[in-house]
Amino acid sequence: MQQEVGVVEVEMGVKASITVFGPASLSNMGPGYDALGLCVGGWGDEIEAWRTDEPGISIEYAEGPVAWDPPHEPDEDTAGVAAATVLAQTGAGGGLRLRLRKGIPLGSGVGGSAASAVAGAWAANLALGQPFTKVELVEAVLAGEAVASGSRHGDNVLPALFGGLVLVSATEPSRYRRIPLPRPLPIALVVPEVSILTKEARAILPQQVPLRDAVHNAAELAFLVDAFRCGDWETVGQRMMADRLVEPVRARLVPCYDAVRQAALDAGAFGCALTGSGPALYALAPGAADAARISEAMVEASRAVGIPATGLVTEADDEGARATGGND
């Protein structure tokens, strides 16, 4: 059930604010390039929003755990574009002010731009009295993500918006299905200190591929989705390492890829793969304690080849973007 949160006027004409969390996400999962993404807990961006009398969107940036160089204008910011789209959909007068605190490094592969987009859209929606459901915000979050990637694709923003696992059309990202997961999914995640931007990682991909590899990926994606539905994490882990089209190319951008992947498997992971454009890698674990051990092994492997890395033990997040507080 969605929480009803609105903005109310308080003394001295100051408007109340609402704070929203936009979670991290895994994308391009295995053979599901641009088609399969998963919302995960632990990391995310936070946005505080409130109504203003001045039209349009304005953004300020609060100090957070991630150092970054923010855009100069709201129309260059994924959160600003998403919020502006929501504001335009309402036709409401006045504007919105956003305060963004980054919790996910951009270029990490865990949906840093998507987290800002969904937080911006949901914060704007709540600040405006929640006129829309999450389903009605799909176009807004896709518009926000397009600022970062150069094109509309939904395998990060839709899981971050809705929570859980989402299958999305790579050519029509407003067409999607949310796939329920039957039981908890423990995940070990490592983010090496290597920056890879989505636009650059897309540019190196082949424009034509062998028919046999395309057929292979299509079949493996079908098996992967079915294994997710069944909660068969061992099969999920095996199938997410079956990509022949994208990951073998992008792995070259991550110098610690082979070492980290092998370390995860040696530590008992069901499977290990890149998420997004990289450099982050995720591994599926039998349980939370196993995920902690696997994460440590992945971090150590990255450091052993001279690349500092951060590890995280997490799991699938079923909630997606949500309000975390308000000030009235």
Image (spheres, helix red, strand yellow):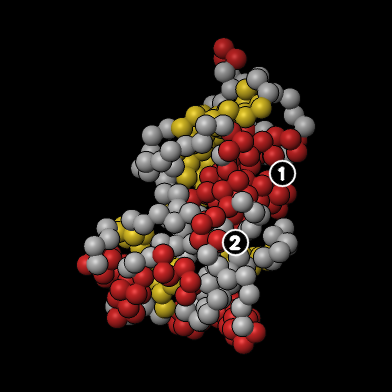
| Image vertical order of residue 295 relative to residue 78, above or below | below
Q: Nearer the viewer, residue 260 or 198?
A: 198
For label 1, the residue is 132
Q: Nearer the viewer, residue 118 or 314?
A: 118
Q: Is residue 196 visible?
A: yes
The residue under label 1 is which amino acid type? Phe
Q: Earlier in the sequence, mark 1 or mark 2?
A: 1
The residue under label 2 is which amino acid type? Asp
Marker disc for residue 155: 2
Seen at 62% across and 70% down, the residue is 207
The kind of secondary structure element at disc 2 is loop
Q: Position of residue 316 (x, y in %)?
A: 48, 64
Seen at 50% across and 81% down, the residue is 242
Q: Position of residue 203 (x, y in %)?
A: 55, 61
| Image vertical order of residue 196 relative to residue 98, above or below | below
Seen at 34% across and 66% down, the residue is 255
Q: Position of residue 209 (x, y in %)?
A: 61, 78
